[in-house]
């Protein structure tokens, strides 16, 4: 299973991201960011499908909800792809 993780600064920021994505028709899920992905202790992540990343980033940028980082989960490992 492949998906993207969009890292947010806090749970509130992640919730705002999820609401924005929902209004755009993008399904997402919020959870705590894996510790090895960030040095921020309270970072949260929003998971989106591979096919939705481009549309998701455009929607988030329009609402000034730019992510901290973006990671691709593929073959059991995370790889940073930018922000």
Image (spheres, rainbow, N blue to C red):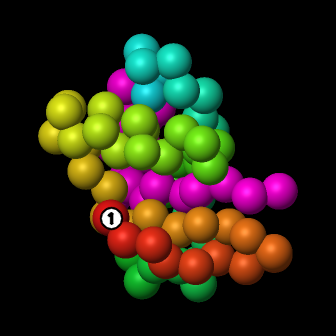
Q: Residue at x 41, y 36 (%)?
A: 55
Q: Residue at x 22, y 41 (%)?
A: 61
Describe residue 68's horizontal placement relative to residue 14 as left or right.
Answer: left
**Residue 11 on the magenta segment:** yes
Q: Residue at x 58, y 56 (%)?
A: 4
Work out whether residue 4 or residue 37 is closer to the camera in this orientation and state it.
4
Location of residue 73 with respect to 40 vertically, above or below? above
- Magenta stretch: give its range: 1-20
Query: Residue 2 location, x and y as percent?
Result: 74, 58
Describe residue 67's horizontal placement relative to residue 14 as left or right.
Answer: left
Describe residue 80's horizontal placement relative to residue 49 as left or right.
Answer: left
Query: Residue 62 location, x and y as percent?
Result: 19, 33
On the image, which quarter does residue 40 sit in?
A: bottom left
**Residue 30 at least partly seen:** no
- Count of numbered circles in the view: 1
**Residue 65 at least partly seen:** yes
Q: Residue at x 58, y 79 (%)?
A: 79
Residue with the mark numbered 1: 83
**Residue 28 on the magenta segment:** no
Query: Residue 20 location, x and y as percent?
Result: 37, 25
């Amino acid at each position: 299973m492949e998906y993207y993780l969009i890292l947010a600064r806090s749970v509130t920021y992640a919730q705002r991201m999820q609401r924005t994505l929902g209004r755009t028709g993008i399904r997402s899920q919020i959870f705590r960011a894996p510790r090895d992905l960030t040095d921020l202790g309270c970072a949260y992540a929003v998971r989106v499908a591979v096919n939705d990343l481009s549309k998701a980033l455009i929607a988030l940028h329009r609402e000034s909800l730019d992510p901290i980082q973006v990671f691709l989960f593929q073959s059991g490992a995370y790889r940073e792809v930018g922000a």
